[in-house]
């Protein structure tokens, strides 16, 4: 039986080896497996797991759906494996976790182990071998984590790993800049802007790289791209630092940047509305988390009280 090969970047994919046929998992089974894998070393109460995919159903029905999904997932993963619990482990109290001692490979774990180790190095301590290792794990990131999952826990993990991914690209950009490989540095700079075109600091760094590479015209074109993106997306001009850099590169004063509406007040209003939208979104997410936590506490409280009521009839309501 081959090593269990699991990918969570992009859509969930599981196989018995890297180049083997994909094992089909139902959506609920994918959710359970992904949640267990993204909480390394932890065991989870069944009430928590049943709330993942069936939180809108009655408690008894949600628990039944969870038991069925766990049974199917265990049967699928352990087909051909003699030892029960090879991948999914249950504690006597009913808590469930992934067996990290099992023979498996997980793309997220491989990515994080290398990224965390190298990003922890001082920038000056990075060597060519580290750059090659980062480039290798960037290839694992062939899509956002758990594409198609929109639960709060999945979104948090997606944002966390996306930040790590972008930090790896930024480190490669700076490393190649320091090595004098400006073409390579520009390549990684463009990768960053493809993911986040509003990164004005990256636009400036690319302008400097073009100048160092003897391409002043391309440096000014990068400034124009930065100017257009900020105007279209945010309704604001580039920062004074960016405008000064463009003036230095062009050998003249940077032209005034048109702002939609032509007035400073419209820019400030756009910024205020953007901040208000962000605050409302954060508030709504917090409210949803609070509601889920309240339901979970109520469920756990009921489960804790049930054995006491059965042992002491006088305690029953």
Image (spheres, rainbow, N blue to C red):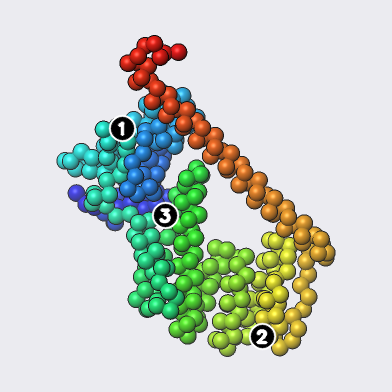
Q: Find residue 200 and report its horizontal and vertical position in percent.
A: 62, 70
* 235 or 43: nearer the viewer: 43
Q: Residue at x 40, y 72 (%)?
A: 121
Is residue 194 visible in the rendered image? The answer is yes
Residue 120: x and y in percent read 41, 68
Q: Secondary structure at mark 2?
A: helix
Q: x and y percent of residue 145 in the render? A: 45, 53
Say few, some or many: other residues with alpha carbon within 10 Å of mark 1 (under 14 / 14 to 19 / 20 or more): few
* Residue designated by label 3: 9
| Residue displayed at 58% across by 43% down | 285
Q: Which residue is mark 1?
A: 94
Rendered residue at 39%/49% (across/down): 38
Q: Nearer the viewer, mark 2 or mark 3?
A: 2
| Label annotation for residue 249 | 2
Mark 3 or 1, nearer chain start: 3
Q: Position of residue 254 (x, y in %)?
A: 74, 80
Give the class, few, some or many, for how many residues have Cα within 10 Å of label 3's Cα (few <14, many ≥20). many
Tell me which label, 2 or 3, sits earlier in the chain.
Answer: 3
Q: Residue furthest top?
A: 314
């Amino acid at each position: 039986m081959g090593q269990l090969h699991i990918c969570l970047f992009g859509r969930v994919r599981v196989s018995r080896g890297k180049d083997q046929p994909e094992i089909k998992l139902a959506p609920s089974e994918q959710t359970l497996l992904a949640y267990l894998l993204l909480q390394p070393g932890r065991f989870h109460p069944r009430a928590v797991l049943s709330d993942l995919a069936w939180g809108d159903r009655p408690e008894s029905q949600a628990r039944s759906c969870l038991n069925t999904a766990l049974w199917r997932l265990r049967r699928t993963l352990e087909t051909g494996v003699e030892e029960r619990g090879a991948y999914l482990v249950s504690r006597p109290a009913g808590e469930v976790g992934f067996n990290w001692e099992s023979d498996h490979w997980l793309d997220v774990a491989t990515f994080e182990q290398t990224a965390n180790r190298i990003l922890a190095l001082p920038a000056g301590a990075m060597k060519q071998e580290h750059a090659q290792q980062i480039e290798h794990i960037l290839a694992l990131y062939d899509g956002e984590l758990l594409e198609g999952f929109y639960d709060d826990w999945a979104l948090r993990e997606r944002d966390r790993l996306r930040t790590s991914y972008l930090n790896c690209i930024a480190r490669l950009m700076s490393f190649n800049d320091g090595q004098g490989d400006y073409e390579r540095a520009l390549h990684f700079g463009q990768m960053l802007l493809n993911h986040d075109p509003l990164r004005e600091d990256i636009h400036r760094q690319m302008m400097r790289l073009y100048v160092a590479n003897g391409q002043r015209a391309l440096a000014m074109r990068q400034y124009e791209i930065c100017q257009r993106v900020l105007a279209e997306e945010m309704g604001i001009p580039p920062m004074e630092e960016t405008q000064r850099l463009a003036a230095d590169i062009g050998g003249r004063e940077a032209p005034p940047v048109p702002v939609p509406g032509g007035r400073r007040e419209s820019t400030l209003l756009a910024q205020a509305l953007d901040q208000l939208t962000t605050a409302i979104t954060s508030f709504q997410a917090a409210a949803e988390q609070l509601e889920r936590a309240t339901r979970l506490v109520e469920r756990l409280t009921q489960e804790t009280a049930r054995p006491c009521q059965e042992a002491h009839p006088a305690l029953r309501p």
